[in-house]
Amino acid sequence: MPHISLAPNQPGMVALSSYRPDVFSRLASLANLLLHQQHPCSTLSPGDRELIASYVSYLNHCDYCHISHGAVAAAHLQNPKLVEDVKCDYEKSEASPKMKALLRIAGMVQKSGREVSSEAVESAKRNGASEMDVHDTVLIAAAFCMFNRYVDGLATEMPGDLEAFMRRGVVIAEKGYERTPVPVEAIGKGEKNEVDEAT
């Protein structure tokens, strides 16, 4: 049961979007920037970025985030098995050496920013990661520790229909986080607003 008064039968960030639309719109923009948009100095695809987000969320035991972002990653990469294998043991997965090195960094960030070692960064660079790739991996991992704690710290619900994650993942992979409106009740107004679904 959620720790605060949230709309019933709405999971994770969908429920929180109704509670603080002003905060949520900014979180949606951040998610879109980190996960969906392609930076010219980065070699990370949106699928790679979602994979990092899902992996960190899995390490944080945030079911809502690791399943939802895993679904988006699977839609981008067209490889659901890879997404699940990365969560179980990325070293034994079919991920590229570059992605394995970046996932290692992401796992370090999940523990503490101070865990990230020069050796891990150099290993990522040797395997083809750019400095921007390293930067974005650290930022995505750090941001998802925040997202995970936001969702779980308020005890948001999980949907009963897990297949909904897969269907939603396809939509978000195509349109991003700022272009998938979800109608929610505006606080204190009883009016319908369109707020972007994210994380």
Image: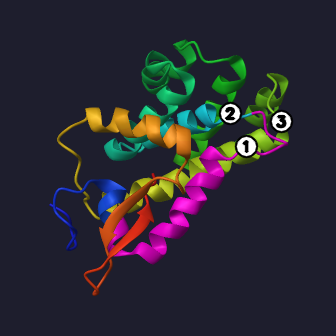
Q: Secondary structure at mark 3?
A: loop
Label 1 vs 2, first from the N-terminus: 1
Name the secondary structure under disc 2: loop
Q: Position of residue 180 (x, y in %)?
A: 46, 53
Residue type beneath disc 3: Ser
Q: Is residue 58 visible?
A: no
Quadrant of residue 108 in the image?
A: top right
Question: Which residue position holds label 1?
Answer: 38
Magenta segment boundaries in residue numbering: 17-43
Give residue 196's position: percent from left, percent from top.
46, 60
What coloring was used for the rendering? Answer: rainbow
User: Dots 1 and 3: beta carbons under 8 Å?
Assistant: no
For the residues bearing labels 1 and 2, Cβ distance under 8 angstroms:
yes
Q: Residue at x 52, y 52 (%)?
A: 177
Viewer-side residue, 169 vs 199:
169
Residue 31 in the image, given as x and y percentages of width and height: 56, 54
Describe the element under mark 1 as helix, strand or loop: loop
| Residue type, mark 1 in image | Gln
Q: Residue at x 29, y 38 (%)?
A: 164
Residue 40 position by quadrant: top right
Placement of 2 over or under 138, stated as above or below = below
Q: Which residue is mark 3?
A: 130
Q: CA distance from mark 1 to mark 3?
A: 14 Å
Q: Give residue 134's position: percent from left, percent from top.
A: 75, 41
The overriding secondary structure of the stretch rendered in magenta is helix
Residue drawn at x 60%, y 39% is 106
Residue nearest the viewer, comparing 3 with 193: 193
Instruction: Please identify, in this view, whether the residue under mark 3 or under mark 2 is nearer the observer.
Output: 2
Tell which of 4 and 186 is nearer to you: 186
Q: Which residue is mark 2?
A: 45
For marks 1 and 2, give the CA distance.
7 Å
